[in-house]
Image (cartoon, rainbow, N blue to C red):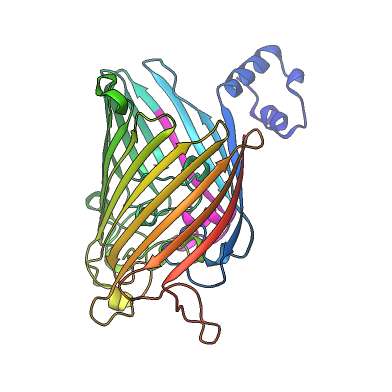
Amino acid sequence: MINKWTLALAAAGVVSLPSLRAEEQHQVLTALSQTTLSGYVDTSANIYAGRTGALPGRTFDGADKQDGFNLNRVQLTLEKPLDEGQWSAGYRTDLVFGPDANYYGTVLNGGGAAPVDDFNIKQAYVALRAPVGNGLDVKLGVFDTLVGYEVFETGNNPNYSRSYGYALEPTHHTGVLFSYHVADWLSVSAGVANGWTGPINDKIQSAGGPRDWADRKAFLGSVTITLPEGTGPVAGSAIYAGIVHGENTATGPLGTGSVPSVARPFTPGGGDNPETTSYYAGATLNTGLQGLSVGAAFDYRRNGVTADPALLVQTLDAKAWSIAGYASYQATEKLKLNARYDYLHANDHTFFSSTSATHARNELGALTFTADYSLWANVITRGEVRWDHAFNGDSPFGSNKTTGIADDKNAVTVAANLIYKF
């Protein structure tokens, strides 16, 4: 048995591994060799062309990120992945530091309030594989949501900025997830979680009532289809569908944070914790043309009616949907060009308060162009131009110099994004 105090000193650098007994050293090195450390540092420089103020519908690049230089986040990942054995075990822990960490709101403060400090646990779960059929994979703990085309890790997305659909989706779940590889072309997942989203270990309870946790769980599932070789030029393309249904612990309109750049859209919560359902369907398709791929995503979110009087006009059966189209072209070995158009149609107060007297709703569109040019090893170097437009006669962007009220139908932003991955 290895002396825990000695191991702690070794980890702190007080003693060296060679000073341990040979058998202890062997066990320590074996354990460490199975764990990988990776991560990235994400930075940006942002310009809100000619304006300042509100940018509704934006995630991670809101008003407070504009007209300056930013450290977005630092992420560290410790992981021991599953191996090919029938009985395999591992784990993963994602730690996020910096302003964007507030988006997750995973760490419970005293009293259950969402945190405002710059640290969060993005994922932390134990992974298991059981010899059931082709192998049943299990995650228990906190893990990423099943739905969505884009992800939290900026460098894994085609664009620097996020679509409107990303902001409609849950972020993570505390629960259990089962995944099964049915065939080469079909994979399925299903799970149960504490809620639609919310802080780690947060349980749902009725307003002023007992914690009826068993009746207030969230259910999630997904299906992934990979087109086989016989499908011609689209072979290898992926089609994905997912659903998350459960009660919601996040409270709106900003949800799990009050920082403008990481503001969540309106997700009614509070007193009666209304049921929230997210539907997602997406695809990434090979075109048969060298270097060119296209994608599409559809998000629909419905929030149940809440009777919480504190929400006033926001006590409604809120609905929101968005569509997005993607195109990616590898122009040269180092240059990649990405484009996205997305459109949002949602109830009023989803991202802003409509000024329309007859058709009060949120209706936004955005066109984004991103150029990714590899200059340094391990560094993602990108430039991006994005144009947002409000339909329905609203002017939710910018800020009037005199009144401070948003007064523009359009917003144009320019960004440079540098990410070092290790």
Image-quadrant location for residue 21:
top right
Q: Nearer the viewer, residue 171 or 206?
A: 171
Which stretch did the figure color magenta?
98-127
Q: Position of residue 24 (x, y in %)?
A: 66, 17
* The magenta stretch spans residue 75: no
| Up/down of 50 relative to 294, above or below | below
Report the residue that reaches farthest toward the top: 22
Q: How many marks?
A: 0
Observer-nearest of 303 and 1: 303
Res 108 visible: no
Asked which quadrant contains residue 326, the reply is top left
At which x and y percent is residue 333?
56, 30
Residue 284 shown left or right of residue 334 in the figure: left
Quadrant holding the C terminus: top right
Task: Report x, y in % for residue 202.
Answer: 38, 53
Give percent across and percent down for residue 258.
48, 66
Establish if 338 lies above or below 16.
below
Q: Residue at x 55, y 47 (%)?
A: 96
Q: Residue furthest bottom?
A: 402
State which quadrant residue 226 falls in.
Answer: top left
In screen coordinates, is 168 left or right of 76?
A: left
Q: Is residue 13 above or below residue 61?
A: above
> Does residue 274 show up?
yes
Q: Residue 125 colored magenta?
A: yes
Quadrant of the snapshot with the N terminus: top right
- Judge left or right: residue 273 versus residue 404: left
Horizontal placement of 156 versus 351: left or right? right
**Who is closer to the viewer here, 96 or 343?**
343
Give the answer, above or below, for where 231 lies relative to 174: above
